[in-house]
Amino acid sequence: MYLIVGLGNPEEDYKNTRHNMGFDTVNKIADELNIKIEKKKFNGLYAQTVMGGEKIILLKPQTFMNLSGDSVVQFVNFYKIPLENIIVIYDDLDIEEGKIKIRKSGGPGTHNGMKSICSRLNSEDFPRVRVGIGSNNIPNDDLVSFVIGYIDKNTRELLDKSTTKAKDAVFEILKNGIDCAMNKFN
């Protein structure tokens, strides 16, 4: 069983922001699998399916970003999902727009959603797909506005390419393992 978690903020105001790249990617995965993410459980919207004989849960925590771990840990504990079968997808300022990076494990960096998940799971040893949103040298006092602010059409197109790459990377992880996915996408 795999738990694929897309991070974002649940309110409509955040729908078209850089901070919702995880939600956008999980939505693309659901579209490709022809399923709807609409069931509610453990402070999250989720869907279940089977792929290659393996049960897959897609999850969009409905807490705000800094409490994402509350939803994730409940799914992990209830379904007894091993850490190596959790894939978290989220936006990353340190990666250029249009690019993604896959890691087997590692610290949360400055991302509050990842800080919450690592804290609640008491581990950093789970795979993640980081979607580049690039800070474009924005001063630190403007980072919040940058991450949750308006995205112009050209940037939206570039970020859509990133979330498509992230979707493809998740399918590669599921089909051929994380090492293959890292070799192909990193």
Image (tube, rainbow, N blue to C red):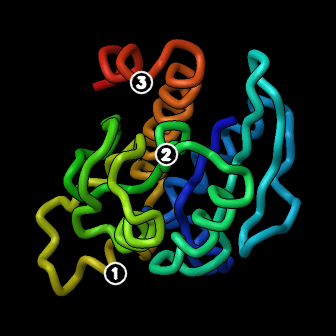
Nearer-N-terminus badge (1/2): 2
Q: Quadrant of the C terminus?
A: top left
On the image, numbered disc 1 is attached to which residue? 145
Residue 100 horizontal side relative to residue 163, left or right: left
On the image, numbered disc 3 is attached to which residue? 178
Mark 1 residue element:
helix
Q: Quick check: marks 1 and 2 in contact, CB under 8 Å?
A: no
Instruction: Residue 171: give its label.
Output: none
Q: Quadrant of residue 11?
A: bottom right
Give percent across and percent down for residue 157.
48, 43
Q: How far is disc 2 from disc 3 in space, using C-alphas? A: 13 Å
Q: Quick check: marks 2 and 3 in contact, CB under 8 Å?
A: no
* Foreground of the two, 91 or 66: 66
Q: Marks 1 and 3: which is nearer the front?
A: 3
Nearer-N-terminus badge (1/3): 1
Give percent across and percent down for residue 129.
41, 41
- Would you call the spot at circle 1 few (<14 residues within 10 Å), some (14-19), or many (20 or more)? few
On the image, numbered disc 2 is attached to which residue? 83
- Would you call the spot at circle 2 few (<14 residues within 10 Å), some (14-19), or many (20 or more)? some
* Foreground of the two, 19 or 122: 122
Give percent across and percent down for residue 2.
64, 38
Does residue 99 appear anywhere in the picture?
no
Q: Quadrant of the N terminus?
A: top right
Does residue 140 appear anywhere in the picture?
yes
Give the answer, above or below, for where 164 lies relative to 10.
Answer: above
The amino acid beneath tag 3 is Ile
Nearer-N-terminus badge (2/3): 2
Q: How far is disc 1 from disc 3 in space, using C-alphas? A: 33 Å
The amino acid beneath tag 2 is Leu
Mark 3 residue element:
helix
Q: How far is disc 1 from disc 2 in space, using C-alphas? A: 33 Å
- Would you call the spot at circle 3 few (<14 residues within 10 Å), some (14-19), or many (20 or more)? many
